[in-house]
């Protein structure tokens, strides 16, 4: 409906331009918002206020002219002027009924594909393989995955890229420790990567001989030494298996085939540097090869360097990221490159994108976006730590989530069997961790709080999962399937209308998530759906309604609610339950 209304407004603007009321060269942004106060209608625009100055008119007078120029349509029931020149629109109930029926019949509850599908390459998760994944890796993995799912349902060709860190100086330290162990000891030690890493680091710090050997092994590894590569591949295989276990538990779509590690670009790095040199972009500074970009300066006004090769000949993250841009454009044929990386890396990616364009590694029309995110914080306002004060391993965090969820279920003394409790606890525990993150603005830090995320009240996963089971239970009692209801929608009660108006916004919300990579929009919407259904359920009897047409309509509203909740939670990577 929003897109249709925007087109109607565009026609009205064109009519006023033809009449000479508006300048022909004005190209306004047709922004429509949904008023918080429903008495103001279904949509509102400040278009008249935006165009008043170029038109040389009073905003209210221009609003009247815009309303008069609206073409005949079946969408708008009423258009009124408010305040200094806002135009409020009320949608006709016939259009609302049509939208409801369309969403009910649609496989994705009314989600329309993007007008121009693209190949979107998404870089997310990307842990360092020197250690096991920890809580700091959570946000990139689940936010990126939600956006992957949303873009996929909109018809984009989504290419997942897990740019894992598997190259660099720390691997020399790990190889040196592996070299000191025999085959059986290596397998045993690698079963706990965190312990293995700490043992390697202690040897590196305590023994100059070990540290020198580690540095030698880095050079040998990067030179293609066969034995080093064999040990390195063993470590990488174990590390990636640990990662995959976590992804599977989280319900993240990443697979081994999506891994495109730092090492994969190693052969292209000399070529990247050489091409920058050929284009006259390289400057040697204290032995290092740098590119100075005028667009980025320090407080003293000096251009900041992008270092692409160290004085000793080694390469940096910038070099690898430039190679990755070339690969994602030329090999993966990406139209849009998206990076879900900590927002503290914002300057780095601005520099990479700018340099990639200057060097011709990125087409002028290639869209590149870094979507940063905040930090997971503890209640003390500091980055979240384990009880022992160390960084919390993600696997341990998920274990704790399932344990706490199981305790909650057992305390309810429900009729669930032990196996049912374990399954539900797994879904509720993992979903609670994910939803607590996804429901917060991506750009903000958030406080990790077990009590709030596992609560059955408020905007939480348990609340939404329970809301879904509550809707589904209606059909269990009725003995019918939600998709098998025959009849029309009939909206007579205010609570029916309120629920209907929220349900038809689903497509609009999903597109907004895709446009801004902000999954919390969808979380807030699903919370509103659940709340509207609760109000509807209490005010409007369904199975006990004597009027068959009304009863059928209310069953269809419940069915569409269930479909919307299930589809919305699936886009967030959250599994629904039939009972709790």
Image (cartoon, rainbow, N blue to C red):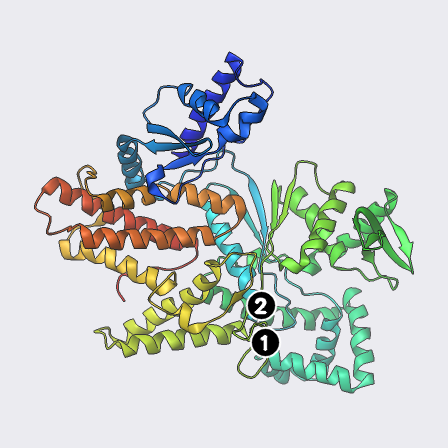
Q: Secondary structure at mark 1?
A: loop
Q: In whole angstroms, how far apart are the C-alphas of marks 2 and 1? A: 8 Å
Residue that mark 2 sits on: 136
Q: Is residue 190 visible?
A: no
Mark 2 residue crowding within 10 angstroms, few (<14) / some (14–19) / many (20+): many
> Which residue, as the protein is rendered here, is positioned at the far bottom?
206
On screen, residue 285 versus residue 328, left or right, reads right
Among the 4 quarters of the image, the one containing residue 476: bottom left
Residue 193: x %, y % from top left:
60, 77
Front position in the image: 303 or 173: 303
* Residue at image coords 46%, 26%: 60
Whether pointer 2 and pointer 1 mark residues with C-beta atoms closer than 8 Å, the reply is yes
Is residue 42 placed above or below 375 in the rendered structure? above
- Position of the N terminus by quadrant: top left
| 22 on left or right of 399 | right
Q: Quadrant of the C terminus?
A: bottom left
Look at the picture and state if 530 lies above or below 547.
below
**Secondary structure of residue under mark 2:** helix
Q: Which residue corresponds to mark 1?
A: 391
Between residue 171 and residue 139, name the one nearer to us: 139
Image location of residue 444, percent across then percent down: 55, 59
- In the displayed structure, 531 sits above or below 217; it is above
């Amino acid at each position: 409906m929003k897109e249709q209304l925007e087109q109607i407004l565009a026609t009205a603007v064109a009519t006023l331009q033809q009449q000479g009321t508006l300048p022909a060269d004005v190209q306004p942004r047709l922004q429509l918002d949904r008023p918080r106060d429903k008495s103001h209608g279904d949509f509102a625009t400040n278009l008249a206020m935006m165009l008043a100055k170029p038109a040389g008119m009073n905003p209210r007078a221009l609003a009247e002219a815009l309303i008069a120029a609206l073409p005949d349509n079946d969408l708008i029931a009423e258009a009124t002027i408010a305040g200094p020149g806002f135009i409020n629109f009320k949608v006709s109930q016939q259009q609302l009924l049509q939208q409801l029926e369309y969403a009910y019949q649609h496989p994705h509850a009314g989600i329309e594909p993007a007008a121009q599908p693209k190949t979107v390459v998404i870089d997310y998760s990307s842990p360092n393989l020197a250690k096991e994944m920890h809580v700091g890796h959570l946000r990139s993995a689940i936010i990126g995955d939600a956006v992957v799912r949303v873009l996929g349902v909109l018809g984009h060709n989504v290419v997942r890229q897990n740019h894992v860190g598997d190259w660099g100086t720390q691997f020399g330290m790990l190889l040196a420790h592996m070299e000191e162990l025999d085959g059986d000891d290596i397998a045993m030690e690698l079963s706990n990567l965190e312990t293995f890493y700490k043992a390697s680091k202690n040897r590196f710090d305590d023994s100059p001989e070990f540290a020198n050997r580690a540095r030698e092994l880095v050079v040998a590894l990067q030179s293609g030494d066969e034995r080093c590569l064999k040990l390195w591949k063993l470590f990488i295989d174990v590390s990636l298996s640990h990662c995959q276990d976590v992804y599977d538990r989280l319900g993240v779509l990443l697979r081994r085939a999506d891994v495109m590690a730092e090492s994969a670009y190693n052969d292209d790095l000399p070529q990247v540097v050489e091409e920058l040199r050929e284009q006259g972009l390289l400057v040697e500074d204290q032995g290092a090869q740098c590119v100075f970009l005028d667009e980025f300066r320090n407080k003293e006004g000096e251009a900041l360097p992008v270092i692409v090769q160290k004085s000793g000949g080694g390469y940096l993250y910038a070099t690898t990221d430039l190679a990755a841009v070339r690969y994602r454009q030329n090999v993966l044929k990406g139209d849009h490159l998206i990076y879900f990386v900590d927002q503290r890396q914002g300057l780095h990616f601005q520099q990479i994108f700018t340099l990639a364009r200057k060097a011709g590694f990125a087409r002028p029309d290639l869209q590149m976006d870094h979507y940063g995110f905040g930090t997971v914080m503890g209640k003390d306002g500091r980055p979240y730590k384990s009880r022992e004060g160390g960084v919390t391993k993600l696997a341990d965090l998920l274990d704790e989530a399932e344990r706490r969820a199981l305790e909650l279920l057992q305390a309810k003394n429900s009729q669930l069997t032990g196996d049912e409790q374990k399954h539900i606890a797994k879904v509720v525990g993992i979903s609670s961790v994910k939803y607590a993150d996804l429901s917060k603005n991506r750009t903000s830090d958030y406080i990790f709080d077990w009590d709030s995320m596992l609560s059955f009240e408020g905007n939480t996963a348990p609340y939404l999962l329970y809301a879904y089971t509550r809707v589904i239970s209606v059909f269990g009692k009725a003995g019918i399937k939600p998709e098998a209801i025959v009849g029309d929608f009939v909206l007579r009660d205010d609570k029916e209308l309120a629920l209907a108006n929220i349900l038809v916004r689903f497509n609009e919300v999903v597109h907004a998530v895709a446009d801004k990579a902000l999954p919390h929009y969808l979380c807030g919407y699903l919370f509103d759906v659940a709340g509207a259904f609760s109000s509807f359920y209490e005010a409007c009897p369904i199975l006990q309604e004597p009027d068959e047409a009304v009863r059928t309509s209310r069953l269809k509203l419940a069915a569409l609610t269930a479909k919307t909740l299930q589809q919305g939670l699936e886009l967030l990577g959250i599994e629904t339950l039939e009972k709790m």
